[in-house]
Amino acid sequence: MLQISRRRFIYGSVSALGFGSALTSLLACSSSNSPTSQALPDGVQLVQRFPQILVPGEVRLPISLAQKSGTITTSSDFKFPETLTAKIIDLSNDTVITENINVTLHGAEILIPYYPFRATIEKPGNYMLVVEGGSQDGAAFSVLERDQVLVPKIGDTLPSFDTPTFDNARGVDPICTQNPEPCAFHKLTLTEAMQLKKPVAYLIGTPAHCSTGTCAPALKQLINVAKIVGDRATFVHAEVYSDNASTVVAPAVKAFAMTFEPALFITDANSKIIDRLDAVFDAEEITEALSRAGVTTS
């Protein structure tokens, strides 16, 4: 059982200083031919799991479910619908711009399951995701002008950056907070990985300070995918803090103008960002993103 304020999930510009709070770490840290959508249980509300830094084009809108009290449970007494269907409303004129967006439940391996809705939105503005069978008071979100968002976006070339490695920590200690041992994604810098001319999966997140939210589970999911993919892609991880006390924001965060964690950037062999998975994601979404980047994952 987990008690979480629904309103606190609606974060989008968490300051760098805010990375240290346990609650912030917890909160941060696709259409399909699926079965018929199921109605939401009575009293269930939508909980946004995405930062408010969306730009025109394909947007990813992962949501979780909460009861009116703000309680989310993954135990057997809470039945998560396997499939949900949603529409998107343009709040400037109350018109439906996209409907029948079907998505299946994701995140069976992490603490809080989620539904990663995706849609294409052509212009900046204010919108609302409304789930069929749920409240009409859906999840409101904004789409910003592309130049208003500094975090690297889908379609951009991923900026090169010399991330900490086992050979050169570059002032970051520890370079990986995964327990009990650091992950293997610190052998190359991001710059070196990009020079290999292979697809790259670059994760910014802090497992130790987000162990039950999303960061640690995200890294574990990435490790599992990497075992399957092998050398067909290069995997790099960077921490959010430079110190174990989580008081100094790491250079990797500043270099990408990050205001949230975790984030996973997937590029093709030419360093073009094919997908960016924000806040919460599982092995299935990682695999799908790598496939779009040209990586065979079977």
Image (cartoon, rainbow, N blue to C red):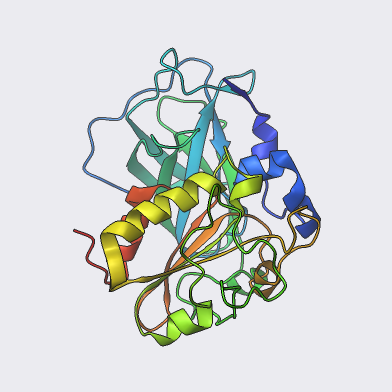
Q: Residue at x 64, y 39 (%)?
A: 9
Quarter of the N terminus within the rendering:
top right
Residue 164 pos. (x, y %):
61, 73
Q: On the rendered structure, is 230 left or right of 286?
A: left
Q: Is residue 175 above or below residue 244?
A: below
Instruction: Kindly give the residue lying farthest to the top in the view shown.
Output: 77
Dividing the image into 4 quarters, which one contains the C terminus? bottom left
Instruction: Answer whether residue 75 is visible to the viewer in this image.
Output: yes
Q: Is residue 285 left or right of residue 111?
A: left
Q: What residue appears at the point 34 percent right and 79 percent down from the top-left corner? A: 198
Q: Residue at x 46, y 45 (%)?
A: 88
Front residue of this view, candidates 117 and 181: 181
Q: Position of residue 121 (x, y in %)?
A: 46, 59
Number of numbered markers: 0
Residue ID at (47%, 70%):
154
- Pinpoint residue 93: horizontal percent, then vertical percent: 56, 48
Q: Nearer the viewer, residue 10 or 135?
A: 10
Which residue in the rendered view is the most extreme toward the left?
A: 298
Picture quadrant of residue 243: bottom right
Residue 108 percent coordinates (x, y): 38, 34
Above-or-below relation of 254 to 261: below
Q: Is residue 44 above or below residue 88?
A: above
Regarding residue 288, the answer to whether it shows in the image is no
Q: Is residue 209 left or right of residue 63?
A: right
